[in-house]
Image: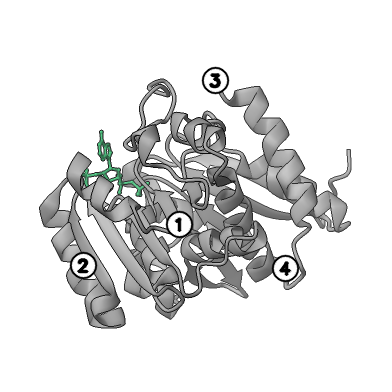
Amino acid sequence: MRFSGKTRVYGVIGDPIEHSLSPAMHNAAFQATEMDCVFLAFRVRFDAVQNALRGMRGLEICGLNVTMPHKETVISWLDAVEENAKTLGSVNTILNDSGKLRGYSTDGFGALNALKANGADPSGKKVLLLGAGGAAKAIAFALGDEVNELILLNRTIQKTIHLLNVLQGKFGKKVNAGSLSIDSLQRNLQNTDILINATSVGMSPKSELSLVNSELIRKNMVVMDLVYNPLETELVKNAKAKGAKVVSGLEMLIYQGAASFEIWTGKAAPIEVMRKAALKQLKKVGNS
Ligand code: ATR
């Protein structure tokens, strides 16, 4: 048993939470950096968020990740929220700073760093982003300054228009959007450099689904699928078959986790260790 009376506690709150890869990833990181810390998963029901954060203060839990469905609601109970998380209206990382709970969002940063680290820097590129939910929004904000053009396609048009207005307000007319259809996909994919699926389509158990017909994928394209269960989604399989570069959704999870680790500890995250632990855990819980 490596824990003691001095062990510092970290964790993740969400519901459901039992399949979270974060405990495996962060405990491996703490061990590799020889930190006397432990990371646990806490199931927190929708109406118990305030109590959970009272517990964080009372028990002096040092840091928490926040996942579905609490990323928005948690904001009401924090003492401070950094600018990017405020803009997104979403917090995935809380730091207990001597009793002051500070909220951050590392999701967009995670996606951007995952692309860069995998040789797919979006600077000056055309990016086609599928989806207009929380994940898509975080990515759009992180990529907005870097890209040459950003196109958003989403099934529900009202949501798309709302997000487009916010993004154009910040990044101008290089951001555009439309409804998700065979036509709009075909038109936009012709000159897209990076395609990102930020919808839940392709996730297990409906893993045979993909929004993008394999004929539309080109060899000189990067394809990132945020879905990582299964790791080889239909979209990823098709992209690989076409010889396109693939960045898995697990990479985004790893890099957002690494950013949380750095906020909590002030130390560089051991990326390779975290990747190995996340992959191992995904293989264990993936299809259960
Ligand atoms: P997250 O926070 O993970 O982004 P979310 O906010 O629920 O989750 O967003 C899910 C995204 O997947 C949305 O863009 C959703 O499209 P709608 O806005 O039309 O709901 C998209 N999505 C889910 N199922 C889909 C499907 N079968 N076809 C197309 N898009 C789908």
Figure quadrant of residue 85: bottom left
- Please give the name of the residue rendered at 20% of the width and 46% of the height, measured from the top-left corner: 180
Callout 4 touching callout 3 (CB < 8 Å):
no
Q: Quadrant of the N terminus?
A: top right
| Image location (x, y in percent) of residue 8 | 74, 57
Which kind of residue does numbered mark 3 sit on? Asn
| Image location (x, y in percent) of residue 241 | 54, 32
Q: How many marks?
A: 4
**Residue designated by label 4:** 265
Q: Check the image and report above or below for 258 versus 249.
A: below
Disc 1 from disc 3: Cα separation: 28 Å
Callout 3 touching callout 2 (CB < 8 Å):
no
SS for callout 3: loop
Q: In which quadrant of this rendering is ligand 1 seen?
A: top left
Q: Nearer the viewer, mark 4 or mark 2?
A: 2
Q: Check the image and report above or below for 85 versus 21.
A: below
Disc 4 from disc 2: Cα separation: 36 Å
- Please give the name of the residue rendered at 54% of the width and 54% of the height, measured from the top-left corner: 65
Which kind of residue does numbered mark 2 sit on? Leu
Q: Farthest left residue? A: 158
Q: Nearer the viewer, mark 3 or mark 2?
A: 2
**Residue designated by label 1:** 194
**Residue designated by label 2:** 164
